[in-house]
């Protein structure tokens, strides 16, 4: 997506300082959603660090994060395909494992993988 000439404004609730690498993927998906003018849906969460070449990297304490996501009522979650630990999927949560930003956009927004 040619977003290099676009301005992006990211607002974190309460004006908190965000230095968590696991928020990378959610931020990228929000930008793609805005650029494509297609909503992600209120039931989707995303966890993952994005590398410079667009690969999605694993994050720490993924199972705890997934449990909290399910507790908050999300039904789908985009996660890294390559994870460090065995994943325990909470009941009612559908996991969407991805290896790249292109796959993540496809999984979240229904676009074909590039």
Image: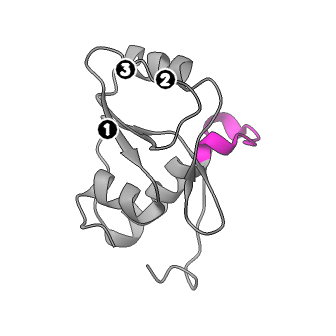
Q: Earlier in the sequence, mark 2 or mark 1?
A: 1
Q: In this view, does 22 lie above or below 54?
A: above
Q: Nearer the viewer, mark 2 or mark 1?
A: 2
Check residue 86 in the rendering and tell me which mark sits there, or answer none: 2
Q: Mark 2 falls on what kind of element?
A: loop
Q: Does the magenta stretch include residue 102?
A: no
Check residue 42 in the rendering and tell me which mark sits there, or answer none: 1
Q: In this view, does 87 lie to the left or right of 64?
A: left
Which residue is nearer to you in this view: 103 or 29?
A: 103
What span is colored magenta in the figure? 12-23
Q: Which of marks 3 and 1 is nearer the N terminus?
A: 1
Residues packed near mark 2 inside 10 Å, few (<14), some (14 to 19) or many (20 plus): few
Q: In this view, does 31 lie to the left or right of 108?
A: right
Across and down, in percent, residue 56 comes to 54, 53
Looking at the rendered image, the quarter that the N terminus falls into is bottom left
Q: Is residue 39 visible?
A: no
Which residue is nearer to you in this view: 13 or 36?
A: 36
Q: Nearer the viewer, mark 3 or mark 1?
A: 3
Residues packed near mark 1 inside 10 Å, few (<14), some (14 to 19) or many (20 plus): few
State the residue position of label 3. 89
Q: What is the quadrant of residue 6 in the picture?
A: bottom right
Residue at 51% x, 20% y is 63
Residue at 51% x, 43% y is 82
Query: What separation in Å lies between label 2 and label 3 (alpha carbons)?
Result: 10 Å
Check residue 60 in the rendering and tell me which mark sits there, or answer none: none
Query: What separation in Å lies between label 3 and label 1 (alpha carbons)?
Result: 19 Å
Looking at the rendered image, the quarter that the C terminus falls into is bottom left
Q: Is residue 56 above or below residue 82?
A: below
Q: Mark 3 falls on what kind of element?
A: loop
């Amino acid at each position: 997506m040619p977003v290099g000439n676009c301005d992006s404004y990211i607002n974190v609730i309460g004006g908190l300082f965000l230095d968590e690498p696991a928020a990378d993927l959610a931020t990228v998906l929000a930008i793609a959603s805005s650029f494509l003018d297609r909503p992600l849906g209120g039931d989707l969460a995303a966890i993952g660090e994005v590398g410079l070449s667009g690969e999605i990297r694993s994050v720490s304490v993924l199972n705890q994060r997934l449990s909290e996501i399910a507790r908050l009522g999300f039904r789908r979650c985009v996660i890294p395909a390559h994870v460090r630990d065995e994943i325990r999927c909470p009941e009612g949560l559908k996991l969407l494992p991805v290896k790249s930003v292109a796959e993540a956009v496809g999984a979240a927004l229904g676009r074909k993988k590039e």
